[in-house]
Every structure is written in C-alpha cells, then in structure tokens.
Amino acid sequence: MNTVITAAPPVILPVSGSEAGFPVRRVYCVGRNYALHAIEMGHDPTREPPFFFQKNPENLRLPAAGFPYPARSNDVHHEVELVVALKSGGTDIDPAAAMDCVWGYAVGIDFTRRDLQADAKSKGQPWAAAKAFEHSGPVSPLVPAEQGVDPARGRIHLSVNGAIRQDGDLAQMTWKIPEIIAELSKLFELAAGDVILTGTPAGVGAVERGDVVTCGIDGIGDLTVTVV
Ligand code: MN
C-alpha cells in the first residue's frame, strides 16, 4: 500500500564484519536483573523478581557526534547491558528451546533519566519518559551467536573518562537469557528483529556533557559514547 506521509525507515543495527545489518522490530529491557544493582536501587532481590519495560527501536540510533544529553533531566545515568538480538520468536517458548531464537549479541547502554524515574516511581507512573527517550540505547555492532559466543559468562564493564564505574560478570544475571526469553514470551509474542537489553550490574551513576563513556563485554564487543 502507498503511504499518505513519509516516515523514517526501520532501524537497522550494524553487524560486526558484515555489510548487511540487523533490522529492529521491538526493544525490551529487563529491570533489576543483577542482585547488587537491585540492592543499590533500594530493592530486595530475594523478594522482587526482575521485570520488563521497553524502549523504542529509534532510541538505539546514536548520532555521529555522540549521545545528546536529554532535556528535562539533571541526573542521567549509565547502565551497561548485554544486548540479545532475536532471529525468531513465538509465545510460551520453552526455556530449553529459547537459545534457538537468538541471532546475536552486543554491548549496549540503557541511558536513564534517573530523576524522572524516581519521580515516576513515587507517583506510581510508567517509566517511558525515564527510559524510552531519544538515543537512550546505543549499542555496539552485533556479533553472530554462531561465532561461538558464550553469553552465560564474561566480564561486563563501563568506565567514564577512564575511571571504572561498573565491573560485573554476565554470570551474575538473576534471569539467564533462556529464562528472559521464556518469561517475555508469556507476555508478548516475540519475533525476528526483537532486541532485549538484559539488565545492568551494580555501579550505575551520572554522566555529564563532555564525558567519554567506554564499555564492553569480553568476547562480544566494545562501545565508546561521548556525551554531548
Ligand atoms: Mn537497565
């Protein structure tokens, strides 16, 4: 069908070592998936399981100049996360079959307007303004799972201006990747192109304009983002 207006084309993420990219359908995020981060945010990980929220595909686009510090916030935090990209999906996926849905991995940052999030929490309001804003989810080029990546373990880290802020291991995730996919598929129909940010280890903190944020996951990738 022809369209009555012209809209932006779908978001396509770069793939390491490939001319072809990965088209993004939806973006899901996991909250409080590392116990020490749940504790630093004032929650009890033994009583509150992880949960989901969303960003928009367009939020994964990063301008060449860097991450533009967003309006309406004075407390924007970094959260380094393992990113999982799906090649297939479905509903009520068996955890034992969930890894068959995975196309590849990346490292990404779930930038968060922490002040707006705290305000939303206090009022029982949704997190959209805190989480799903422009350029809030930059990701590294994707690495295909078939390259032998082991996403069950590996150092995940983030530094600001060379000073280490977050330093964890994928093995610390409360919900592992098969459980995340299985749980998500009970709530939503997953499909090829879906991207999941799987939660952040402890050490989140504020960024300022001019900061250079570097992060990585061993065996998966690295990402450098300048805050402008
Ligand atoms: Mn997060």
Image (cartoon, rainbow, N blue to C red):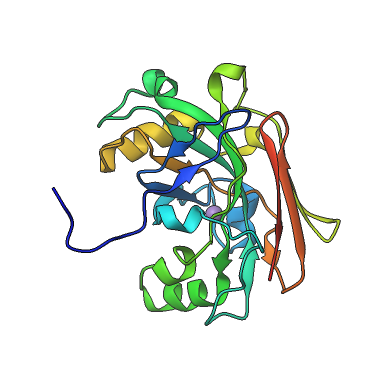
In screen coordinates, is 168 left or right of 152?
right
Q: Give 24 or 82, whichever is nearer the viewer.
A: 24
- How many numbered discs? 0
Extreme residue toward the front, this view: 2
**Does residue 174 appear in this view?**
no
Q: In the rendered image of this protein, does residue 201 appear above or below residue 20?
A: below
Q: For ligand 1, which image quadrant applies?
A: bottom right
Q: Give 17 or 138, whichever is nearer the viewer.
A: 17
Q: Give 7 or 135, whichever is nearer the viewer.
A: 7
Q: Position of residue 74 (x, y in %)?
A: 62, 81
Residue at 36% across, 73% down: 124
Quarter assignment of residue 90: top left
In screen coordinates, is 181 left or right of 224?
left
Residue at 70% across, 69% down: 207
Extreme residue toward the right, this view: 162
Q: In the rendered image of this protein, does residue 133 appear above or below residue 54?
A: below
Q: Give 119 or 101, whichever is nearer the viewer.
A: 101
Q: Position of residue 228 (x, y in %)?
A: 68, 71
Q: Position of residue 62 (x, y in %)?
A: 57, 57
Q: Position of residue 30 (x, y in %)?
A: 47, 48
